[in-house]
Amino acid sequence: MLKCWAEFPGYEDFIRNIWGSFHLQDWGGFVLRQKLKLMKASLNEWQNQHSQNLNGELTTIKNRISILDSKGESSVLHDDETAQLHDLSLNWHSLARA
């Protein structure tokens, strides 16, 4: 696991859902080992999906932030636009750290 993965939106839900989806029965150590092996495969797939177009996502978010900033300079942003700008900024920072 990479620490930066925790910055991706939906990562924690993904981990909870995947871990809970494994239903194995045997003695504790074996079950843990098998779950970790299955988790590794799932994390590799998840990482490939979420980091494949990272630069494109950053550019898209940056462009949307720029549009909202420009609009905010000429007029007052609505509450939903302000919330969207905040969310976009958080997403950009988390993806940029990754």
Image: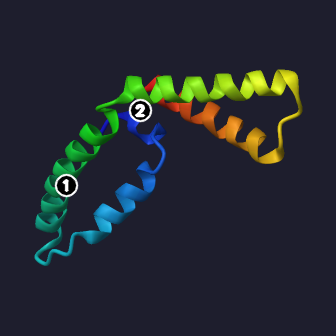
Q: Nearer the viewer, mark 2 or mark 1?
A: 2
Residue 24 location in percent, x, y?
Answer: 15, 74
- 7 relative to 93 in the view: left or right: left
Tell me the tag on residue 96. Answer: none
Quarter of the figure that contains the C terminus: top left
Q: Give me the residue at 70% from left, 35% from top.
A: 85
Tell me the tag on residue 4. Answer: 2
Q: Give me the residue at 41% from left, 32% from top.
A: 4
79 versus 98 height, above or below: below
Pointer 1 residue: 36
Measured Cα–Cα span from mark 2 to mark 1: 19 Å
Residue 84 location in percent, x, y?
Answer: 68, 41
- 21 relative to 31 in the view: left or right: right
Residue 15 location in percent, x, y?
Answer: 36, 56
Location of residue 93 by image quarter: top right
Quarter of the figure that contains the N terminus: top left
Label 2 amino acid?
Cys
